[in-house]
């Protein structure tokens, strides 16, 4: 449903490591390690209940959702959904401005 | 205890865990990674980090808005906004641990 296409230009950890290798001259192993650690650190901070603020990019926050009644869409039966904690991402102003006028406006 | 991880704290802890890299290198790498993701999104590409989540764009159609102060109607053109969907592993990590007596989870 998103505008963004899943094609061969999709950015992955491997692509980002490759970029660090090309643009910074880090060796491939160092670049891969750094990328892994980058996302691991963010995950760890969130896991321990923290907020992650990456200025210019956005903030990762936690939201506590209380228990509610959901419904199995197939059978229509009501089922309890337990209280849970979820991650939300609030894009920063700079990122919002940057993607605002993405040329690929037609999905 | 609300811990806040900022970009500079992230750089410091990465530098501490990667002693063979200088602080300056880590700082530049973090900057490049964030720029790479922003740039890709602005060009309409997805960012998919296995275990962490994916970033994509969502389309927001044009609408009539209102200046809240003056009440004057203004036309707001269509736009794209970034969207993050946490991956399965991250969702599991941050979720509060279900108590053992709760047996039904979907």
Image: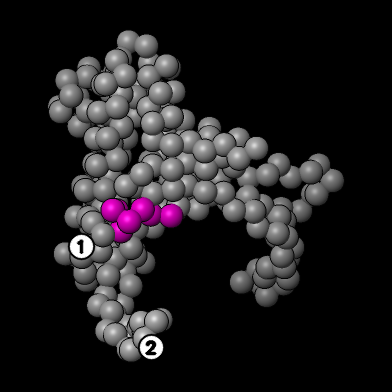
Up the image or down, A4 lies above or below B38; here it is: below
Chain letter, disc 1 residue: A
Q: Locate the C terminus of chain B and report the quarter of the image it occupies.
A: bottom right
Name, please, the residue furthest toward the top.
B20
- From the image, tell me which residue sits under label 1: A102
Expressed as whole percent of the image width and height from the top left, the position of residue A36 reads: 39, 28
- Total labels: the figure holds 2
Mark 1: secondary structure? loop
- Answer whether residue B45 is magenta in the image: no
Locate residue B37: give its quadrant.
top left
- Answer whether residue A95 is magenta in the image: yes
Expressed as whole percent of the image width and height from the top left, the position of residue B23 reads: 31, 19
Mark 2: secondary structure? loop
Its colouring scheme is one colour
The region drawn magenta spans: A90-96
- From the image, tell me which residue sits under label 2: B71
Q: Locate the N terminus of chain B and report the quarter of the image it occupies.
A: top right
Instruction: Please report the residue visible at 59 percent of the width from the left and 53 percent of the height from the top.
Output: A63
């Amino acid at each position: 449903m998103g505008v963004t296409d899943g094609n061969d230009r999709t950015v992955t950890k491997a692509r980002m490591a490759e970029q660090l290798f090309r643009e910074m001259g880090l060796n491939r192993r160092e670049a891969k390690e750094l990328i892994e650690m980058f996302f691991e650190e963010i995950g760890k901070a969130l896991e321990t209940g923290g907020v992650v603020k990456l200025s210019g990019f956005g903030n990762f926050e936690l939201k506590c959702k209380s228990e509610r009644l959901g419904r199995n869409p197939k059978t229509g039966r009501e089922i309890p959904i337990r209280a849970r904690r979820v991650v939300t991402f609030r894009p920063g102003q700079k990122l919002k401005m940057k993607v605002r006028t993405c040329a690929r406006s037609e999905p | 205890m609300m811990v806040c991880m900022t970009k500079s704290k992230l750089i410091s802890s990465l530098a501490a865990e990667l002693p063979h890299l200088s602080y300056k290198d880590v700082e530049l790498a973090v900057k490049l990674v964030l720029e790479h993701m922003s740039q890709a999104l602005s060009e309409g590409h997805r960012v998919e980090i296995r275990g962490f989540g994916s970033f994509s764009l969502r389309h927001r159609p044009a609408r009539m808005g209102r200046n809240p102060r003056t009440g004057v109607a203004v036309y707001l053109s269509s736009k794209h906004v970034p969207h993050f969907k946490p991956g399965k592993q991250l969702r599991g990590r941050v979720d509060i641990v279900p108590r053992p007596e709760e047996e039904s989870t979907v």
